[in-house]
Amino acid sequence: MSRLKTLFVFVIMAVFASTASAQMMGKPVRFKAVKKQVNENTFDVIFTGTIDKGWHVYGIGLPAGGPTSAKLLVDKIDGAKAEGKLKAIGNEHNEFDEMFGMKVRFFENNVTFSQRFKATGGKYHVSGRLEYGACNDEMCLPPTSVDFSYDGDAPKTDDKQVKDEEQEDKALAAENNTQNDAEADTTHAAAANSASATVTSEQIASELWKPVIDELNALNGNAEGTSSLWKIFFMGFLGGFIALLTPCVWPIIPMTVSFFLKRAKDNKRKAVSDAVTYGLSIVVIYVSLGLAVTALYGAQRLNDLATNAYVNIFFCLLLVVFALSFFGWFELTLPSSWSNKVDSKAGKTGGLLGIFLMAFTLSIVSFSCTGPIIGFLLVDFSTSSKILAPAIGMLGFAVALALPFTLFAMFPAWLKQAPKSGSWMNTIKVTLGFIELAFALKFFSVADLAYGWHLLDREVFISMWIVIFGMLGLYLCGILRFQSDVEGGDAGPKPVASIMLGMISLAFTVYMIPGLWGAPCKAISAFAPPMNTQDFNLNTKVVEAHYLDYEEGMAEAARTGKPVLLDFTGFGCVNCRKMEAAVWTDPQVADCLNNDYILISLYVDDKTPLKEPLEVTMPNKTKKILRTVGDKWSYLEETKFGYLAQPFYVTVDTEGKPLSGSFVYKEDIKGYLEFLNNGIKKMKNEN
């Protein structure tokens, strides 16, 4: 028993260690600028970047209308000139991006940018910044800069031509900087207006700019933390309850309870105590499984699973295998030698360890029925992006599985009233097979969207669900039968409960049919591919922000009394376009944004120059100069809401206080609607 406790503690420590390592992660991209002297008159400014796994930094000179290119901006240069252009060193990828409609170049893991300068003689000074864009599969950073400033002395020369070249290089540097801004202005001209091009210290000190980080974190914690974990626990509990009703578990309950009652003979308290210990052992076994999954993947890896294409393809195939097993094509079993050895050990060992080994024997013997259910649950929990989800879900599963053993030991008379084993258990297995087959398509859809295969667009997905749930309805009504039904003696008419469930499944099938022509089908919006993948859609809705300036939009909100949705976005943000195409095009979302909210889109990569640059103090006490409109919105996002990536959505009231937490990249129409509706409810309560 002491070894078991040690193992349990070790698994828990591993989970907390992985969680801590994820929480200690700093910025996903880190650059360091150094000066490397080539000779007396020539030096290189080298920017060495380290890029976290899953992130990438875009290359130099990408076409207009694409993501943020890496570029060198020279603020001041005296006594020196730039030689050549900025160079990139590293393994550059060149891939076509459907969202931008062009090929984009980017670097992963690491990259080095280098710019050579030549001193023209005497003292020199060069200062400026490297600007770059970075994204991962879920978000993008605003255009980020790395400042540099270097002074020095170089051997003097009387060559007049050198001085002329110096003046030319100054003009060229100014022209390049102007061209960089002009490219952005051409692409993003719609975002420029007189209000957004102004920022003052008085404006930043106003109530609208007041930090609300603690309030936002509290709302996010309440909205997405506790309630979501309770949902995960309930889903696990439901899975455990279904597992109870399978032919691998239900017949074992009376056998096990009778064993405890006979072993304790006339001591009912001892029988109940053994049954409780047996139940707790089941809980320990399955919770340890959930903790082991978390420790194996780690906190950050669990967050990545939701959008990883390869992982989702694997999950899809796994669920198909589980479905075929439930249909009776084959049976998933663990080696019989495992259960024999554990059962033999349990018979020779008494006390707590013996009871624990009995519970372990149950988990092995019942694997053919519980394995696909556990596998399905762990797949769903692992892709929920919550570190505790596998453990909490398995806790719910284990509680449901263990509860009957304890209750029947406490009240033996209940055993006589319990349903007898029969063909109804096979019906449950086959029904689960249909459900797992339907959810397998959901995971394949993630990979299909990631790679742009267009094999499972929305109408194809809905068509396949119509077939699956239509066949499920026919099966539950007794019209369709499997070989396992015949072998199990289920050749007669189905019971009333089964036929009623079949009618519900057929009604759900009919409900989905209008989705083939663009109906929103709210009940499946969280599972089906986004509306923009539909070839024929009769419900096209366009969402456009009427305000691109924070103060102007907030003034309109104060006038109308409507809540505000702040959309921190970017012209070069791929995932922002995905959210707009996949979520904002949903008719219900579009109606809510157009009619119930004041939508303010703030582009953090807008290069429109501010009328007057402003020096500000960042949360880490460092100084930063706001030069562009994009700098202004990046500063607002970071200081007011404590976040610095796009897309980032937050609902606020007319005073700039958060209403329903925040929402980041997740193509979840149902979740996004809930996020918006919670903001509307909170606004009504305030009024």
Image (cartoon, helix red, strand yellow):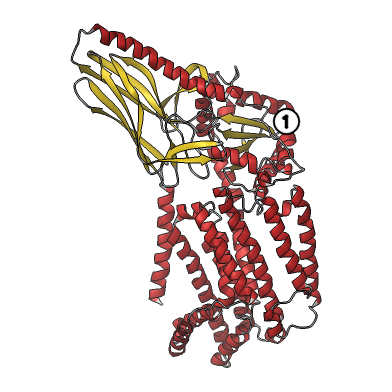
Res 366 → quadrant:
bottom right
Mark 1: which secondary structure? Answer: loop
Question: Image height check: is 5 above or below 618?
Answer: below
As drawn, 409 above or below 541 = below
Q: Residue at x 67, y 80 (%)?
A: 484
Give the residue at x 20% y 17%: 154
623 relative to 392 in the view: left or right: left
Above or below, 235 relative to 200: below
**Residue 49 sits in quarter:** top left
Q: Nearer the viewer, residue 137 or 169?
A: 169
Q: Nearer the viewer, residue 192 or 13?
A: 192
Q: Residues within 10 Å of mark 1 (few under 14, many from 20)?
A: some
Q: Is residue 407 above or below residue 200?
A: below
Write down the residue under mark 1: 561
Residue 665 percent across, percent down from the top left = 57, 44
Q: Quadrant of the N terminus?
A: bottom left
Residue 215 visible here: no
Q: Is residue 218 visible?
A: yes
Q: Position of residue 96 (x, y in %)?
A: 51, 40
Q: What kind of residue is marked 1?
A: Gly
Q: Position of residue 242 (x, y in %)?
A: 65, 72
Position of the C terminus, as image quadrant, is: top right
Quarter of the rendering containing residue 477: bottom right
Q: Residue at x 80, y 70 (%)?
A: 500
Percent coordinates x, y for residue 643 in the rendering: 51, 38
| Residue 640 located left or right of residue 176 | right
